[in-house]
Amino acid sequence: MIFVKRFIVVACSVLFFGSFLHSTNIIIIAVDTLRADHLGCYGYPRNTSPNIDKFARDAVKFNNCYTPSPLTTPAFASMLSSLSPHRHGAKRNGMSIFDNVKILPEFLKKYGYYSSAFISNWSLRKELCRFDRGFDTYTGVFNKKRWLGILNSEGKAPKVNEAVFKWLDRNSRKKFFLWVHYTEPHIPYVYHKEFNFGYNKITSSAYPWGSDLKRIRKYDTEIGYDDFYIGELIERLKKIDLYEESLIIFMSDHGESFGEHDYYRHGRKLYNSCLHVPLIVKLPGNKDGNSEVNKNVSILDIVPTIFSVLDWQVPDEMEGMNLFDPDRGRVLYFEAYRGAVHSKKGKKFHLKVKPIRYGLLKGKSKLIYDWRFEAYDLAKDKFEIYNIYRNPNRKMKVESELLKKYMKKVKEFIKFSKKYFKQKSKLSKEDIEKLKSLGYIKK
């Protein structure tokens, strides 16, 4: 009899808890071009992110998260599909995911979720990347004029919030997945004097050699600007009783380089200035709040973690893993491609696009292949200044063999994809001009 009673109690608990999880709202807040090391909660000496830092106190902060590719479309495609760029097909801006690739909102439909996205970077337009599949609404917010006011190529944070708040007023009682995307830190950086945060108090020694401090000053005020409106969004979620029990994920697609390694912007290099991104996960009920995890993780892990938290089976095709699984000496791989493609290149060109650089991270050991190997010990050299591959030891040789095998696998898959997959995105003249304005195509 006691056993029967216990069984009934456990069964009822499982049913109740399962029902609760299955009604959990999912919210992804993404900031374009955001370096993890420029946020206060990641140790940055300037107070750029008070609202994000406050959010982190309710959540789990992953200190070592990386993007598989430091470019907007490939990175977000990887986030939504849990596939590396060569596998999902959207390898450069202006390219779309393959027809057979399934992304998060498509999976969520069978669980009764209503999905909506608000994006503010031109390269995420549905006509280019085809990320709208599975979404019930996919809204582009483009109101900000760039480059001497000639082009409307992105959406300002207040306009993004305005659109999101209207959507929440109509849909807050639904079971939903909401993706909110802010783009301010993206070049060309605008200086917001109200978010200067004591720039003059920070010495140049806080940055890698070669850093352009004038650009960093503007970039940091852009972070502060976005942080203010992210704070507004979080307060709105609290006001309508959606914050506490929602699964909320804060992340970025890639970072930015300010002259380190003689490189500016992002996309083509595989140093941590462009790969290391913030990832902060607030679980339902603020479970495990104000904690941090130091293992290496990837934005590939976001969708598998959503599935795991909600007690769903993770699809076999996904490459990522549950962020909360134990660290088992994982190896992360990276791919860098050129910026954007021209429509005149045609479908065959799109399909044969190959990486221009490859990278690997195992523990604190970093390898980059760019016609030759570079190796860095991140435990001693966080800015990747000292290439220690000149006389590779046994460990480096093992890791270089791993990277060679990965490179071979990528090349074989791309060769296979040329024959069997389709690429439907088409760049209009307007698209090419917009992508030029974002710095993805040389003028």
Image (cartoon, rainbow, N blue to C red):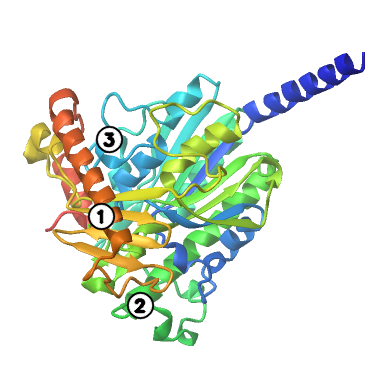
The kind of secondary structure element at disc 2 is loop
- Residue for point 37% across, 49% down: 332
Comparing 75 with 52, the one in front is 75
Residue at numbered disc 3:
87
**Quarter residue 341 falls in:** top left
Q: CA distance from mark 1 to mark 2?
A: 26 Å
Residue at numbered disc 1:
400
The kind of secondary structure element at disc 1 is helix
**Quarter residue 147 falls in:** bottom left
Comparing 40 with 418, the one in front is 418
What's the mark number on residue 208? 2
- The image position of residue 230, as x and y in percent, is 54, 55
Q: In the picture provided, is 208 more to the left or to the right than 224? A: left
Q: Mark 2 and mark 1 in contact (Cβ < 8 Å)?
A: no
Sequence-wise, the earlier of marks 1 and 3 is 3
Q: Residue pushed farthest right?
A: 1
Between label 1 and label 2, give the one nearer the viewer.
Answer: 1
Q: Mark 3 and mark 1 in contact (Cβ < 8 Å)?
A: no
Q: Tag 1: residue type?
A: Ser
